[in-house]
Image (tube, grey):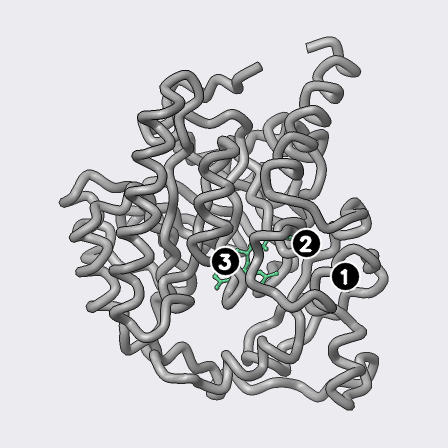
Amino acid sequence: MRYTTHMTLPAPFSTLRLPVIGSPLFIISGPDLVIAQCKAGIVGSFPALNARPQAMLDEWLHRITEELAAHNRAHPDRPAAPFAVNQIVHKSNDRLEADLATCAKWQVPIVITSLGAREDLNTAVHGWGGITLHDVIDDRFARKAVEKGADGLIAVAAGAGGHAGRLSPFAIVQEIRQWFDGPLALSGAIATGGAVLAAQAMGADFGYIGSPFIATTEANAEPAYKEGIVAGRAADIVYSNLFTGVHGNYLRSSIAAAGLDPDALPEGDLKTMNFGGGNGSKAKAWRDIWGSGQGIGAVDRVESVADRVDRLVAEYAAARARLGI
Ligand SMILES: Cc1cc2nc3c(=O)[nH]c(=O)nc-3n(C[C@H](O)[C@H](O)[C@H](O)COP(=O)(O)O)c2cc1C
């Protein structure tokens, strides 16, 4: 079964096997993960900042573009899904202009923007025929992003890994769908095919899945982190702004291992946020403190991306059958 996208969705999404975007994961997502996700039929993505130094981004985009083109030549019956590059639009990101120029060179099909919404960036991506998706934690930011020219939105709800929102997924999707009929992905604790179908039933076009892909063979994470995702459940997730200045979800065991009390963390400081091209404090913090969403109770093993996506596809079909649709 191949999932057929909604008529109004832009062309890049027409080749998806399942309505899923593998979300960008700081440090964890690189070419191996992205290529495996795209070949498995879901959108793969990575933060541009994972390619260090900046010149590495050109090599990564070269490799991803060539390997996906080769896959498409060999398998015209099951073409790869498009990939996305995540740009952190924050004043501390001193690589943004250089990274955008590299994305322009490779005509990256989808650019995911986080934190700031910028009109000139959207215009630049449209210039090479790409589309932009902007991630937001509430309706106010969603409206701002669309005003600035974002083509689509990612609603980051409570329970998401990394910088999570506070709203129920029902609340945020309902509000956005009152005025926006473009591409909409839902992020936060989606870890089964049934949950992907639920996101669609709510009004989203895609499930945006992060943490379950940490526990895959292609993820750039140490074995203990992958096992932590497998062992962890929602109760093991701590919501704190200590590590980057913005509230996010983390695995309790990694906080304790760093010598901190997960139940008594001090408040963080927004001024410490650093997305610079160097090995900034954020990189250090995220290497020791493991980000994760609340959905990992559904992850019971480390496996290949292909196997994980097959499982999601089977669960999605079973959920449809259960509902008789
Ligand atoms: C370890 C980790 C790192 C992340 N890094 C980024 C990032 O660099 N850029 C970004 O836009 N989102 C990042 N996210 C958030 C994800 O894109 C996505 O919103 C989230 O993982 C979805 O929730 P889930 O993990 O419950 O599936 C990160 C999430 C995790 C768990």
Is 288 on the left-hand or right-hand side of 137?
right
Q: Earlier in the sequence, mark 3 or mark 2?
A: 3
Q: How far is the residue under mark 2 from the one under mark 1?
A: 7 Å
Q: Residue at x 64, y 30 (%)?
A: 310
Q: Earlier in the sequence, mark 3 or mark 1?
A: 3
Q: Could you say which is closer to the camera, residue 248 or residue 255?
A: 255
Is 170 on the left-hand or right-hand side of 17?
right
Residue 18 occupies quadrant: top right
Q: Earlier in the sequence, mark 2 or mark 1?
A: 2
Where does ligand 1 appear, by image quarter? bottom right
Q: Residue at x 54, y 62 (%)?
A: 28
Q: Does residue 278 lie above or below 235 as drawn? A: below
Q: Position of residue 288 (x, y in %)?
A: 64, 80
Residue 154 in view here: yes
Residue denoted by label 3: 29
Residue denoted by label 2: 215
Q: Are marks 2 and 1 in contact (CB under 8 Å)?
A: yes
Residue denoted by label 1: 227
SS under mark 3: loop
Amino acid type, callout 3: Ser
